[in-house]
Image: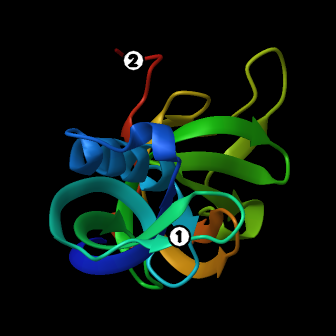
Amino acid sequence: MFFHIVLERNMQLHPRHFGRNLRENLVSKLMKDVEGTCSGRHGFVVAITGIENVGKGLIRDGTGFVTFPVKYQCVVFRPFKGEVLEAVVTMVNKMGFFAEAGPVQIFVSNHLIPDDMEFQSGDMPNYTTSDGSIQKDSEVRLKIIGTRVDATEFCIGTIKDDFLGVINDPTTA
C-alpha cells in the first residue's frame, strides 16, 4: 500500500536558477516534477520526504542547462492484488461501479457484486440491498483482484467476499 523508498532522478536546471538558492531551486523543481506522478514500477509518488544527495552537475552542451543527479526519499502508494481498500464510489451504471482510493481508480463489475444487490436505474443509479445501497459518494470496502499500471494505475475490485461492501451510505447519513 504505502512504502517509503529511495529513488534517483536527473534534474535539469536553467542557469538563471544558479546562485545562493541553487539547492532550494533544485528541490522545489524536483517536488513540482515528481509529486503526484505515477511510475509503473513504484506506483504513485505521494510526497518527497527528504533529499539524500545532490551530485555534481554536468553542463549540457549548447544549452547551458546543468543536469544534477538527485537521490531522494519519498512515500509511494501502490495497491497489490488481494489488498483490501476503502474507496469512494464515483460512478454507478448497470455494468458495475467505479470508485477511487486516493489516486487509484477501481472498477467493480456487476459480476463481482453480491447477487442480492439489484441495480436500480433512474436519476440516481444504485445497487440496493437490505444492508444499504451503493451510489455516487458511497464509501465501500473492496478487495483488489487485478491491477494495470501505465501512465495511471487502474484496478479491478470485488465486493463479493466476507466483510466487504457498503461502509457508509450517503442516503442514511
Whole-percent x and y of residue 116? Answer: 61, 56
Whether residue 126 appears in this view of the structure is yes
* Horizontal side, residue 21 vs residue 98: left or right: left
Disc 2: which residue: 172
**98 shown above or below 85:** above
Q: Quadrant of the C terminus?
A: top left
Q: How is the image coloured?
A: rainbow
Residue closest to the eye, 162 or 102: 102
* Horizontal side, residue 94 vs residue 26: left or right: right
Disc 2 crowd rating (10 Å Cα; few below 14, some 14-19, many 20+) is few
> Residue 135 occupies which quadrant of the picture?
top right
**128 shown above or below 147:** above
Q: Residue at x 55, y 64 (%)?
A: 38
**Badge 1 amino acid:** Lys
Disc 1 crowd rating (10 Å Cα; few below 14, some 14-19, many 20+) is some
Residue closest to the eye, 78 or 17: 17
Whether residue 131 appears in this view of the structure is no
- The disc at residue 160 is 1
**Badge 2 amino acid:** Thr
> Residue 5 occupies which quadrant of the picture?
bottom left
| Discs 1, 2 touching: Cβ within 8 Å | no
